[in-house]
Amino acid sequence: MSTMNTVGRPTTPNTLPDNDYKHPTLTGGRGLLQDEALIFEGEGWGKTGVDLPTPKTDGSDLGDLVRRDPIGLPGLSEPEAMRHYVRLSQKNHAIDLAIYPLGSCTMKHNPRLNEKMARLAGFSDIHPLQPQSTVQGALELMDTLSHWLTTLTGMPAVALSPKAGAHGELCGLMAIRAAHEAKGEHEQRRKVLVPTSAHGTNPATAAFVGYSVVEVAQTDDGRVDVADLASKLGPDVAAIMVTNPNTCGLFERDIMEISRLTHEAGAYFYCDGANFNAIVGRVRPGDLGVDAMHINLHKTFSTPHGGGGPGAGPVVLSEALAPFAPAPWVVNTGDGYKLVEREEDEAEQAFGRLCAFQGQMGMYVRALSYMMSHGSDGLRQVAEDAVLNANYIKARLEDLMSPAFPDGPCMHEALFDDEWLKGTDITTLDFAKAMIDEGFHPMTMYFPLVVHGAMLIEPTETESKAELDRFIHAMRLLAQAAKDGDVERFKGAPFHAPMRRLDETRAARSPKLRWVKPEGSNHAA
Ligand SMILES: *Cc1c(COP(=O)(O)O)cnc(C)c1O
């Protein structure tokens, strides 16, 4: 076993079992990938990559604020800095490397046209505190994006500022709470109903806003159990939160009945719109009776995703909730564009603000660039191709693996359970790790929770048939190996990744976020 150093990184990373590498490498490097130390563990404390002129002042005007100790930053030359970060980037997967089949996450190609547009100086070099008369183009872009989002969803209003899907959920539930407060019903409506298959952010958001969460059962065919929902709806319910298509990759057939029952009970219908990619251009959530829905621009509208953001989760709102939308929003006065920023006048019912400024401008530019380059016909084709691709994967794997809901087509993601692994001693986790060795990022595992050992695969429309075939080929070889009892291949995997199996729970529960200087080291403090 390796020992851990102060930052929890194995000091001898090459801990491969004998049955894998007969000849573990001597340095920890692998196949042109060198082992990468933390930047603080390097040697370069005494150097700098830039040559700054000697300051003309002696710092005496800083008084007490003058620094007494060295600042404690490692020093690297430009090539060293470059290599450090490029090597780190090579330890991770990226959508620019290969298919990223994470179900529910909609990891699609980020068109470079979007990047070019986002870098136009008129968008990238402006400041949120500039006078509005000087940023009319940016405001027009926000107005145009709002128009596309409301048109695609068939909803009258949109709050652009939320910065992620989960933030959008918070926005939607806060608007719902404000609407109940305005009607004097907030005190009695304390519950939010959430199906068992929901994304974890749904119950978390409801709880965060102060509601108690009540689970709604699911039918055997993976949909909301309408009878169970009806029995739980009542004058104490503020809202339901339903995803459509749901996280089993299935369209909620009874969606009209679900929204009718919800409204009849005086509650609002929050739709988690993270799966909008499956229906964009084909179905308008407004027509389904939805009152609020977030749209992850970083999923459906191709803005970069992951790495902690920035994302963007605008929320479309129904007539009933629109008055409670948070500031700010853009108004076209006919004589230019105006930002309504304060909770007075036109915005007197707004529940407040969600963030300091206007949201993620760069994401707005990328999303609108994506929309305009596809056109409305192209966006419709996005949904159609995303669904076609998922069904192709399902059809090509269902003889070897077990689809969780075999009857009928799926929407944008193919969901398998671990029934087909029974008796092999191989788990979903083992299978996923073996995929890494074959050069493929695993699908989403163990989600949705209602499916045992779930494997949720979302190819998106941006994968070509050739790429899907390569993925399917690897999956079939692995599935066959599992069935043939090649247990070692799975139990020890990944053998070829820079890091082996990590204790993810421990990493999440007790992350080491600080570098501690080793005792007796002569590194500058
Ligand atoms: C991604 C996702 C969310 C949360 O969106 P973030 O932008 O990651 O906060 C919520 N619900 C579903 C179904 C999702 O897939």
Image: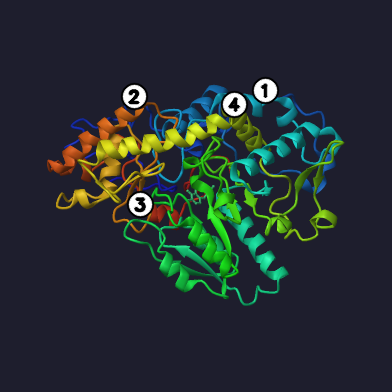
Distance from mark 1 CB to nearest ligand 1 atom below 8 Å: no
Q: Which of marks 1 and 3 is in front?
A: 3
Give the labeled residue for mark 4: 373
Indicate which disc, 3 or 4, sits on the residue closer to the N terminus: 4
Indicate which disc, 1 or 4, sits on the residue closer to the N terminus: 1
The disc at residue 51 is 1
Residue 255 visible in image:
yes
Q: Position of residue 102 (x, y in %)?
A: 40, 42
Q: Toward the viewer: 510 or 110?
A: 110
Q: Which amino acid does label 3 sit on?
A: Asp
Give the labeled residue for mark 3: 503
Q: Which amino acid does label 2 sit on?
A: Ala
Q: Which quarter of the figure is the C terminus placed in?
A: top right
Q: Distance between the residues labelled 1 and 4?
A: 45 Å
Q: Verify CB contact (< 8 Å) between mark 1 and mark 2.
A: no
Q: Distance between the residues labelled 2 and 4?
A: 24 Å
Q: Where is residue 353 in the image (x, y as percent from the top left)?
A: 72, 55
Indicate which disc, 3 or 2, sits on the residue closer to the N terminus: 2
Dot 2 surroundings within 10 Å: few (below 14), some, or many (20 or more)?
Answer: few
